[in-house]
Image (cartoon, rainbow, N blue to C red):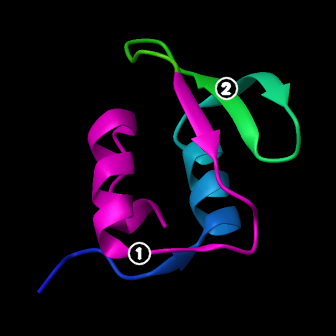
Amino acid sequence: MSKWSSTKAKIVYRALLRIGWKEKARKGSSHIQLERPGFPEYTWAWHDSVEIGPVALKKIAKYTGLKPEDL
């Protein structure tokens, strides 16, 4: 069983901000470029109400350092 469970995009985005990611640029309503020292830039391309599944959360965590307990 996965450590990750499906979560709304707005909850994941807020968690990224809490762990140190900052908005660098915004293009449209869903594409946000994020930056954090020690990590390459990350483009957030999710609408707030979208449910993100475990596989996608694992990929997001790989690039951003997010952990299940951060949610």
**Looking at this rendering, what residue extends furthest in the bottom direction?**
1
69 in magenta: yes
Classify residue 4 as left or right of residue 34.
left
Mark 1, Cα crowd under 10 Å, few <14 / some 14-19 / many 20+, is: some
48 in magenta: yes
Could you say which is closer to the camera, residue 9 or residue 18? 9
Say whether disc 2 or disc 1 marks the residue closer to the N-terminus.
Answer: 2
Q: What's the residue type where badge 1 is placed?
A: Gly
Q: Please give the residue where the numbered disc 1 appears in the rendered image.
A: 53
- Residue 68: x, y in percent? 34, 66
Total label count?
A: 2
Q: Quadrant of residue 38?
A: top left
Q: Please give the residue where the numbered disc 2 appears in the rendered image.
A: 33
Decide: is 13 above or below 26: below
Q: Which mark is residue 6?
A: none
Decide: is 52 above or below 36: below
Q: Secondary structure at mark 1?
A: loop
Q: Which span of residues is magenta-colored? A: 42-71
Residue at 75%, 74% in the rendered image: 49
Residue at 73%, 38% in the rendered image: 31
Decide: is 6 above or below 9: below
**Looking at this rendering, what residue extends furthest in the left direction?**
1
Could you say which is closer to the camera, residue 29 or residue 11? 29
Q: Secondary structure at mark 2?
A: strand
- Residue 18: x, y in percent? 61, 46
Q: What's the residue type where badge 2 is placed?
A: Gln
- Residue 67: x, y in percent? 33, 56
